[in-house]
Amino acid sequence: FILLFYLPTLQCLQYYNYTLHITKSTKYLLSDAVQSSRYFHRTQHTQTEAIAVKDQSSIASVWILQKEIGSNMSMEKVEKIKPNHNFKKMLFISDRIVTSNNFSKKQIEFITRHTSDKLNAMSYRYTLEEILQFSNDKLSNFSVTSFVWNTINEDILAVGYGKWNDKSSGFKGAVCCWSLKNPVYPERMYEFNKPITCLDFSKTNANILVVGSYGGCVYILDIVQEICDPVIVNEKQLQNFPIWSVVSFLQKSYTSEDEFILSVDGNGSVRKWSGGVSKTYNTEQMSLIYCGIRNDSAKLNKSNLSTIVQNMPGTIISFHPTNKSTYFIGTKVGFVVQNTIDSCNHYDRIFRAHNGPVYGIKFSPFCPSIFITYGADWQIKIWMENVDVPLLSLCYCNAVDDADWSPINSTVIVSVSGAVICIWDFARKTVEPVMMFTCKTGVHFSLVKFSKYGNNIVTGDVNGQVRCFHISNMPSPSFLQKSSILTALENMISNHELVQIIKKTMMKK
């Protein structure tokens, strides 16, 4: 007989209705239709003769590799291999190749564009399916506090982590750069002694990441380097208030266009820092101050009225999509402040948006004058620029932790509240979401964001996991997206004055 043993399935071979004996050598015995290590020991001599190859330098058999990196290899050789850059790079590529065998279909599904379904154009049947998960054992007790896609390489997702109310030793915050090519282990991981609260990529250098921390520091990271010593932007003006939002932006001058960083902290201080590692970091400060009137008695006398002056802790910064010098800031007391970069000592506009902390401000990708705010009062409110009252309110039975506009459908919004993912389409429904997906017990979502092509969403939770969900059975988007969103708002609004404002906006567009 000529025996061919295939290594990966060797232990699974079974022989039925006969017994095989090797007469010349009794060292290898297969009997009773059972194969076990007691009767058979695999050695190099059980293999067939090696195939003759002209170029022996690029081919190595299993036995040669086992001989070289097995128990006979000395520790000195291991120590020589570890710091080798080429060896690390080969392991890095090999890890991606092995991982792609398990996740290739899901990865292709994530990056595929949305395809229109004419039969489903008038329906709104949404289905969510979890396809990918970015998680690491070292970050299992951390909360996902922020994430942002890279400005050039859209396969790279930077994620910020924080551990709260933990007195144990070790790092309290981390920044990981995940790649869709390897959802098992992050490409980069940087540890910090304070929780990370916010992230943003540079607008000019895709390898520069701006990081805000709970300890009040604003860092600059170069993610090209595996081991990076972060630059502390505000080292000389450091305060112990948490940095809740950082945004990188470009500002034009008479001669050039420079990059700056805008930050807001828990004390209500809004600061502008010069961007770049080699520059001097100057700051321009503005304080968010609330001035109101308090009635000290039930009697409406002027003597009983007093003025309230207090700082408003900032929560989020959002720049206007077309007017690059205008930005909006949400606060923990429910107000939204509108200002410009050149105005440092006063507000251009302030209005109450929510009866509680404002968690986010997002502008529509199709109509720059429309934006949403959401917060702890269970509501997502749709606003129009320079209008003091909301056009529409979408109410859920829990605080809205995060929300995002769809990049392919102007009337679709996704939000997360606790363990529930909600998809809203205010062109069809405003009383309740068109789809609600409840995740398993113990999950509390903290963030949500649409992918570039709109048929996937990415979520973060308080357990340190980043999940990717695929949305199927979506309705076909409208051909005229700007007209679609304004028409939907006009149909849902009962206030005649607001309808006239929307009609004027439609005529301008």
Image: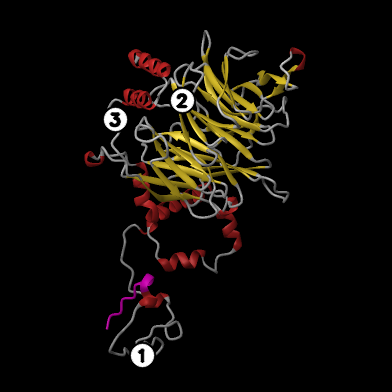
Number of residues whose C-alpha sits closer than 10 Å to that of mark 1, classed few (under 14), some (14–19) or many (20 or more)? few
Residue 316, position as x, y percentages in the image: 57, 29
How much space separates mark 1 and mark 2, taking CA atoms?
75 Å
Q: The C terminus appears in which quarter of the rendering?
A: top left
Q: Percent position (x, y) of residue 318? A: 53, 25
Residue ID at (43%, 50%): 132
Task: Residue 371: give its label.
Answer: 2
The residue under label 1 is: 32
Mark 1 element type: loop
- The magenta span reads 1-9
Q: Main secondary structure of the magenta part?
A: loop
The residue positioned 47% from the left and 67% from the top of the image is: 66
Q: CA distance from mark 3 to mark 2?
A: 19 Å
> Does residue 25 sit above or below 122 in this rendering?
below
Q: How packed is label 2: few (under 14 Cα within 10 Å), some, or many (20 or more)?
A: some
Q: Residue at x 34, y 78 (%)?
A: 13
Instruction: Evaluate if marks 1 and 2 touch, with contact meaning CB atoms under 8 Å apart.
Output: no
Q: Earlier in the sequence, mark 3 or mark 1?
A: 1
Q: Residue furthest left?
A: 119
Labels 3 and 1 touching (C-beta < 8 A): no
What type is the residue that disc 1 sits on? Asp
Foreground tag (3 vs 1): 3
Say which quadrant the N terminus sits in: bottom left
Q: Residue 331 in the image: x percent, y percent? A: 61, 27
Mark 2 or mark 1, which is nearer the start of the sequence? 1
Under mark 2, the amino acid is Phe
Q: Nearer the viewer, residue 375 or 269?
A: 375
- Residue farthest along the right direction in this orientation: 303
Residue position marked by numbered label 3 in the rendering: 478
Q: Which residue is rendered at x = 22% and y = 41% of the image?
A: 119
Q: Is residue 134 magenta?
A: no
